[in-house]
Image (spheres, rainbow, N blue to C red):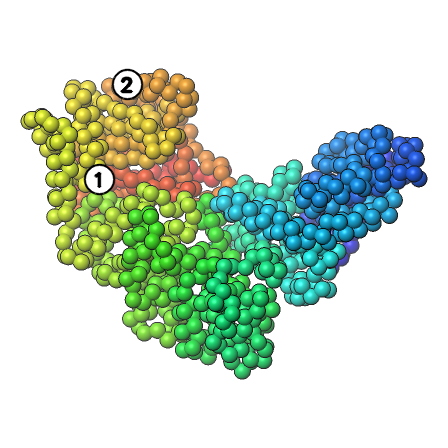
Amino acid sequence: MVAGPIHKTTGNAANTPASNLRARRKELFSFFPKEDPEDFIRAHAEALDDYFRESYAASRIGPAMAIDKNPYAIVGLGGYGRAEQCIHSDVDLLILFGKKVPDEAEELVREYVYPLWDEGLQIGYAIRSLSDCIQIAKTDYETLTAMLDARFICGISSLYADLAARLGERITGRFTGKVSQWLVDRNRKRHEHYGDSAFLLEPNLKEGAGGLRDYHTLLWIGKIRYGIKTFNDFKYEGILSQDEYDHMGDSLSYIWGIRNRLHYIAGRKCDQLYFEYQTRLAEEMELAPKPGQMAVERLMGDLHSRMGYIKKQLLLLLYDLGYEKPSRRSVFFRKRPDVPGIDVTRSGLNFICPGDILTNPALLIRIFEISARMRLPLVREAGRLVREFLYLVDEDFRRSPEVKKSFEKILTTSSAPVNVLEQMLENGLLTALIPEFEGIVDRIQFDAYHLFPVDRHTIRVVQQLKRFGEIRPEDPDENLCADIYRGLKKKHLLLLAALLHDVGKGVPECRHSEAGAEIAGPVLERFGYSEKEIELVRSLIRNHLLLVKTATRRDIYDEETAIRMAREIGDIKLLKMLYLITVADSMATGPKAWNDWTASLVRDLFLKVLRILEKGELATGAAVRQAEQKKTHVRKKLAPGGRELENALDLLSPRYLLYTTAPEIVSHIRLYNRLGKAPFVWDIEKGESFDTRKVVICARDFPGLFSAISGVLTLNGIDILNVQVFTWKQGIALDVFTVTPPPDLIFEEERWHRAEEDLYAVLEGKLDLSSAVVTEKPVRKDHVAFRPNRVVIDNESSSFFTIIEVFSYDFPGLLYRVTDVLTRCGLDVWVAKIATKVDQVVDVFYVRDSQGNKVGRELAAEIEQKLLVVLPEPD
């Protein structure tokens, strides 16, 4: 980190310390975006130093306290003590007395602190004697870490020197292990807390993993264990190499710059980089978009890269000190690797001699193979040597059978507790071995769905697949995955596909699955795989979204869906691998991508297609048996039902019988029996969670019924989360809406009664929803990247229906707006599927026109245009 120019304003002698500080800060802030971030935070700290020195010199209280007998000093703590003062960071201050704190000390606060409060600064201060500081620091390690960053500002310097000496003699020197362990434990808990998805999408620059607190922990442990004074000493003591020191300095400077801009934009102390600030920051930094990558994605990619490096350096230090060692079998520690040139040290694996790498470049990958097998990390020096000798990874290296064999072992060997692929990525070997991987390194997708950069996500998918083979989970979906995974003969091909499944995202303006399949071909050919093996991996990459998209956007209880999938996939082994990669990909994407509903749909679709491929059995045979079993259950529950029950059972459509559980059918028939001559009846039930309700409506069907129900719910402030539309025989509709409760829970019953009256009024023609529901076109005001609205009209996938897919962003009334357009276009909705993708909604409708036919080409164009008109636009 190289020092640069520091701008300094000289205050007029007649000015007060506070006015001088105000002028100084105003000038600093006026040019801070163009200033080197490290120079700025140091200059900001120096401006505060001058304020305290001027205040000390002008103090009326100090001389009256007999400071010759009881001297005092002003000491900066925390970030101010490190001279790392960001724009709205707190100013932590210690007024240190050599002896007992005098009563007049409070008057010093009025002189020093009150003017700063008037300037809007956040000041944290303590007034303590030297002995008090030591006594408190012995038991309160939060206070101790603040004092480890202490810096003398003004007053009697010998007091500060005594404080530093006593801290070393009585605390850090005596309790080195205890204090270090406390720092390690606190660091681990902080990483666990801020590893939550919210903090990955909107990282905390200070407390998040790889944030400034990791750097502070690195400093504190360095001061306790090595006696370093400043960050520069890490280089002088040989803890960091010159390259590591420079990279660390660059990363810190970048984060300081982001943090200062964030403070400035927010107008307050703010360390959480919320979505609303990310785009603006990218604009303020004048980052230009690249093909296929927005400016904000570049910003977040650079930030994640630098935060990842800081986290890595802290963990490496902890590994070296023995605090973060993965669990291992003692036999592994005693046993020497069977690869000449590689040895086990106290901290992990290392090369015996750098010269061995020159004569045998395969050692560069063999050490990672041993790391996977022995479950030991590489020591810091080994990582340095890997990076230094990456130039040896040439075309001959990549085509080496020995290298291929090692890489396959790395892929298939359990990676817990050491993530070997991540080690290879961080040390540059993964991208050297597969240069095509470089395009997705630190690549961020700016949405609320993908939590991790693309490169890290692909590694997580590989990890998840291997986890299927290591445990027998209680979850039925993972249990099924475990059984399938263990039965695979060529697991390495599945894992290769997982590693490369998103590599196409580095190619701008292409469907990433298609681009990835094309990229994978040369990669696998270079490794020496056969044409048949290459085609299998390419098929997995090309179709890795097929199952989940079909399951969530198509009617899986329509036998055509399963038959079409069986024809498209055509091979049982490929289907099983696709199912595994689908589940692992969704689970690794984040908690919003994989839930019970999605898991159930994907599993059911997989089993239906598997049955067809294994037995040549269409869905019809199994469906008939399943439907009869449910009818038998209903007859027992509703006995004696007589002719009326049989008539009700005859009304049920095959799709309804397949989709609905037997207990639900019993409940729905009871609801139908209440219908009589009324236009509709409904039941309101509590949902699976406290904040949802299930509305089951049985009504006499007519075109526009679905839209009318949606509009009435919207009119009453009830948001629709999901819906199942069923059409029974003889014009009976059975719709199940999952919704939020009304806004005021105290009057929930009254609001449901009002909604019921509104629906009666709509069905009787007494209430015009188009005028009652707000018709102003919605504007999307959140700050995640806006993907264009899209309407897809599919006349090929179903023999009897036109399938309309609407891709948009959720807002109250979206479903009503869409279905109202469909109704006005003369369409009848037979099936509806609502798939919410965190920040985007995919509404899918199976429709027919008024004559029972599929939609023609001209009407399809009209529908698309009208739907796009009612969808939200970016603010």
Q: Earlier in the sequence, mark 2 or mark 1?
A: 1
Horizontal placement of 726 versus 528: left or right? left
Which residue sits at x=88%, y=44%?
156
Q: Residues within 10 Å of mark 2 (few under 14, many from 20)?
A: some
Q: Which residue is mark 1?
A: 659
Image coordinates of residue 381 in percent, x first then y, are 60, 69
Q: Amino acid at mark 2?
A: Ala
**Relative horizontal placement of residue 524, taking residue 78 as reference (left or right):** left
Q: Residue 74 shows which numbered tag?
A: none
Say whether residue 542 is visible: no
Residue 350: quarter of image: bottom right
Q: Nearer the viewer, residue 373 or 49?
A: 373
Q: Is residue 2 left or right of residue 329?
A: right
Residue sitting at x 70%, y 39%: 90
| Residue at the spot of label 2 | 761
Q: Is 839 drawn above or below residue 172 in the view shown?
A: above
**Residue plotted at (12% across, 40% down):** 628
Which residue type carries mark 1?
Answer: Tyr
Q: Is residue 666 left or right of residue 513?
A: left
Res. 735 visible in picture: yes
Please report the residue visible at 75 percent of the width from the left and 49 percent of the height from the top. Answer: 170
Camera-near label (2 vs 1) is 1
